[in-house]
Image (cartoon, rainbow, N blue to C red):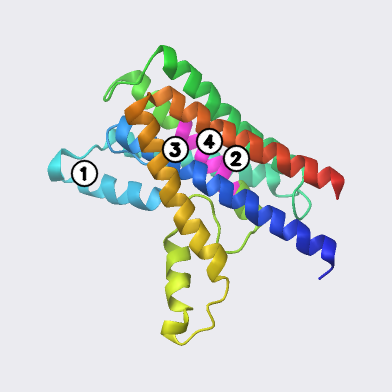
Amino acid sequence: MSITRLDSARRHLLLMLVLTFSTGMIDAIGFLGLDRVFTANMTGNIVILGMGLVGASDLPVLGPAIALVAFVIGAAFAGRVLRNARAGWSGLTTTSFGITGGMVVALGVATLFAPPVEHTVWGFVVTGVLGLAMGLQAACARRLGVKDVTTVVVTSTLTGFAADSRLAGGTSENWGRRLLALVLMLAGAAAGAGLLLLVNFGTGLVVAGGIVLAASLVGHIDRRAD
């Protein structure tokens, strides 16, 4: 592998780790502010939906269902758009991440003026838009193909971290990036919860969306430089 390609791979890894942090923020804000709904972590969302369907602990049903459907639509749309894109970071990658960030920022600004309320039409609209944006981001990150960093879930990352560790008889392959992904998701969730509790819902989304837009811009500039 050439130095240029290695440097590019490292930059892509850094950007995906940044997006992992912002995803932690968005999921925390959504879970705490939208009646226990995940808009990025669909594994957790499906579990909540399954429990909610049998009436366990008054868990929500409609919110998780809307987030799930919107996520699938966003991922399917990104998959179609990016199907013929060149390998690595392309103009379509910038556009896709840019749309994600723009949607989150716009939604944050809107909720500054009209905070979402649980079990209302506006609350469900916010849930759907966030799910759509996260589906778009997840599919774009998948297309970019940075190993062990999907930006939206860390279960497989945690599994690889443990199963490939020296404790398990492995070589601890990629332990650094795996650990960073786990820590950044945790830190993002803490930051999102803090902004929601100390400031408000909209500000948290504006900050998270701004991070996504910044990552998209950096990726685009690096692509042009390469």
Q: Can you say whether 207 is above or below 223 in the image?
A: above
Residue at label 3? 26
> Callout 3: 10 Å neighbours few (<14), some, many (20+)?
many
For residue 75, what is the image quadrant?
Answer: top right
Q: Quick one: 121 or 154, which is closer to the camera?
A: 154
Label number found at residue 77: 2
Query: Residue placed at 40% from the left, 31% from the top?
Result: 195
| C-alpha distance separating marks 2 and 3 | 21 Å
Upstream in the sequence, badge 2 or badge 1?
1
| C-alpha distance separating marks 1 and 4 | 25 Å
Upstream in the sequence, badge 2 or badge 4?
2
The kind of residue on which mark 2 rests is Phe
The kind of residue on which mark 4 rests is Ala
Frontmost of labels 3 and 4 is 3
The kind of residue on which mark 3 rests is Ile
Query: Residue placed at 44% from the left, 29% from the top?
Result: 204
Residue at label 4? 133
Label number found at residue 65: none
Residue 154 percent coordinates (x, y):
45, 58
> Callout 4: 10 Å neighbours few (<14), some, many (20+)?
many
Residue at label 1? 53
Frontmost of labels 1 and 3 is 3
| C-alpha distance separating marks 2 and 4 | 11 Å
The kind of residue on which mark 1 rests is Leu
**176 sits left or right of 192 in the view:** right
For residue 115, what is the image quadrant?
Answer: top left
Indicate the secondary structure of the residue bearing disc 4: helix
